[in-house]
Amino acid sequence: MPERILVIEDEKKIADIVKTYLDRDGFDVTIAGTGTNAMQLLKNGFDIIILDLMLPDIDGETICSAIKEFSDVPIIMLTAKSSEDERVRGLGIGADDYVIKPFSPKELVARVKAHIRRTKRSERKTLSFNGGILKIEVLSMEVRKSNKILPLTSTEFKILLCLAEKPGVVFSRLQLINAVQGYDFEGYDRVIDAHIKNIRRKIEDNPQKPMFIKTVYGTGYKFIGIVDK
Ligand code: CA
């Protein structure tokens, strides 16, 4: 079954270009030209939503908030607004990504694919490491050490999952903050270090000699747990 994408965009030319590119990659694309039309179509269920911020009737922010109240479908916002404030505001109301007009249709398709990959990855239920000592339950966001549930905060969980999904890959602090927050801010490197310290305190036998999260000096962190087959 092809993934279903709803494109909410009143400029017909842009909507058609986006549809052409997504069709070419085998997606099932529906276009809504107004916010009202979009709200009616939403009940059909979509795998991803591309949402223009400036619509003639209901503004994109309102639609985004409304969708996020009943669904966690990924939303990519399209907008001419490009200031940092607007970007952060968009992400703050639940958009998962932001593409600034004018944009390259190829880049938009690449982002769509990245979000679909991410959704599919998180459908995989349990990640297990070191002979079942550390288990990460993706859907329920539970982490177990030797079958005992560890009290990780949601940010700690996201950081751990980001690292554990790609064992051996070094993540910079900037990549980690972007993965969990969707944007960076001043002082994020210290924030990441503080989170890593807390995660280690919870998941490691000896935080000084970590079995799971290793510091890569001058670069960042990597996950060194051994994946169970
Ligand atoms: Ca528009």
Image (cartoon, grey):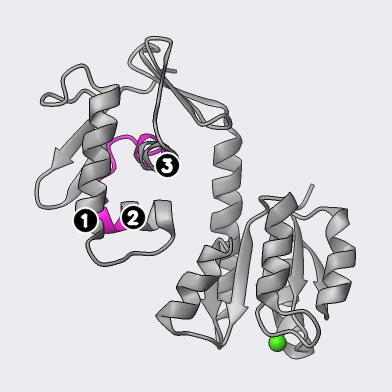
- Identify the residue position indicated by label 3 in the image: 158
Residue 25 picture location, percent across and down: 68, 63
Question: Any atom of ligand 1 within 8 Å of the CB at mark 2?
Answer: no
Name the foreground residue: 65 vs 99: 65
Measured along the vertical axis of the image, is residue 92 above or below residue 207? Answer: below
- Identify the residue position indicated by label 2 in the image: 177
Name the foreground residue: 140 vs 99: 140
Whether label 3 touches label 2, CB < 8 Å = no
Relative to 43, is 92 on the left or the right? Answer: left
Which residue type does callout 2 highlight? Ile
For image coordinates 51% across by 31% down, the residue present is 141
Residue 88 picture location, percent across and down: 46, 71
Answer yes or no: is residue 21 visible: no
Q: Residues within 10 Å of mark 3 (few under 14, many from 20)?
A: some
For image coordinates 40% across by 12% down, the residue present is 132
Circle 3 — which element? Answer: helix
Whether label 2 touches label 1, CB < 8 Å = yes
Residue 196 picture location, percent across and down: 25, 39
Circle 2 — which element? Answer: helix
Q: Is residue 169 magenta?
A: yes
Between discs 1 and 3, the one toward the N terminus: 3
Relative to 33, is 130 on the left or the right? Answer: left
Which residue type does callout 3 highlight? Lys
Measured along the vertical axis of the image, is residue 171 above or below residue 5? Answer: above
Name the foreground residue: 9 vs 55: 55
Q: CA distance from mark 3 to mark 2?
A: 10 Å
Q: CA distance from mark 2 to mark 1?
A: 8 Å
Q: Which residues are magenta?
A: 161-175
Relative to 63, is 188 on the left or the right? Answer: left
Residue 126 picture location, percent across and down: 52, 24
- Identify the residue position indicated by label 1 in the image: 189
